Image (spheres, rainbow, N blue to C red):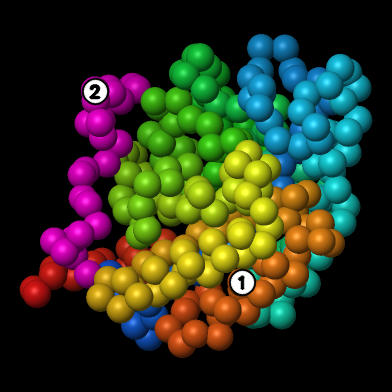
Amino acid sequence: MPVEFYHGMDHQHYDWNPLNGDRDVLRWPDNARVALCVLLTLDHMEWRVPEGAFQSASLAGGYGPSPFPDVTRWSHREYGHRVGVYRLLDTLAKFGITPTVAMDVLTAENYPFLVRHLKGLGCEIIAHGISVSQQITENMPEQEEREYIQSSMERMTEAIGTTPAGWLGPEYGESSRTPQLLAQAGVSYICDWTNDEQPYPIKAPQGQLTALPINLPLDDVNALFDRHIPIGRYELMLKEGFDALYQEGAKNARLLVLNLHPWLMGQPFRVRYLARALDYMTRREGVWTANGSEIVDWYRSNPPEANKT
């Protein structure tokens, strides 16, 4: 069942369709230039990596891996569940943004008060695997991955009361089979592929799967923790990136999926930089703030039009 990989983009997950003058024109509601989707990622780091599971050796948090119990990194990340997420939610609300929340199973099952709070705000909750300590990789046998995905969806449905429409893999992790297995499990859209500024269809023998690409260089962990970009420069990156999308979106609408981690961006000294960037974006006319399902549903119901120019 895994797709074959060759060289370049030569694989079977989707068709080659570069975003240039020949791509069909995408229109958002009211001819908005940019669809803005803010994604909050809530993932739980277990004290010990379960036997046989994979956790990235470069997993962000704390000062890097330390001997058991790694209190600094574990508690640094839990800060997001206890404090940071509420600060970010309050900040987003000031700009009329209701985020999409990528939540893993262990968060959903062990933080029921957080689930209730997010649902009360009208947030869409999407699946995010079991935990950040249990990442999907090619080393996972197909049947084990199938059971992992099925278990994730079933346990999330039980914990949040609805079946998640979207999926973000822990640490963006996939095998060569993952999109097809997700489609079979009823997932509607996937955020792991970070290669576009518009949604696009993923090939799947069963179900219907759409890619909702995150802007990876603007992912706060990628920018602030991995690349050590100063927070003031990060604010400028958000504004400059938005400006380019807004300008280009006049001809062919663009998408900005901004992935934020409450343990990192929810810190008190960072949040004002995010607020200034969001204020800059949402003051512009022609910006549609929406959740993942709203964007994907619109994209499917209003397919891009042939470019006649």
Q: Is residue 221 above or below residue 63?
A: below
User: Relative to the observer, which residue lies in front, 82 or 274?
Assistant: 274
Tell me where the magenta segment starts and ends, as one range.
Answer: 1-25
Instruction: Give the secondary structure at mark 2.
Output: loop
Q: Is residue 15 above or below residue 135?
A: below
Say which quadrant the N terminus sits in. Answer: top left
The label on residue 6 is 2
- Residue at (75, 50) in percent of width and height: 264
Q: Name the residue that disc number 1 marks.
A: 277
The label on residue 85 is none
- Residue type pointed to by label 1: Ala
Residue 7 included in the magenta stretch of the image: yes
User: Relative to the observer, which residue lies in front, 51 or 70?
Assistant: 70
- Residue at (74, 18) in percent of width and height: 50
User: Relative to the observer, which residue lies in front, 234 or 124?
Assistant: 234
Q: Could you say where residue 110 lies in the image, as x and y percent from the top left?
A: 84, 42
Secondary structure character of the magenta stretch overall:
loop
Say which quadrant the C terminus sits in. Answer: bottom left
202 sits left or right of 110 in the view = left
Q: Could you say where residue 256 lies in the image, as x and y percent from the top left?
A: 47, 63
Mark 1: few/some/many CA within 10 Å (<14, 14-19, 20+): some
Q: Is residue 106 above or below residue 91?
A: above
Q: Could you say where residue 196 lies in the image, as x and y percent from the top left?
A: 36, 52
- Residue at (43, 54) in percent of width and height: 212
- Residue type pointed to by label 2: Tyr
Whether tag 1 and tag 2 are in contact, CB under 8 A, the answer is no
Mark 2: few/some/many CA within 10 Å (<14, 14-19, 20+): few
First in residue order: circle 1 vs circle 2: 2
Residue 119 included in the magenta stretch of the image: no
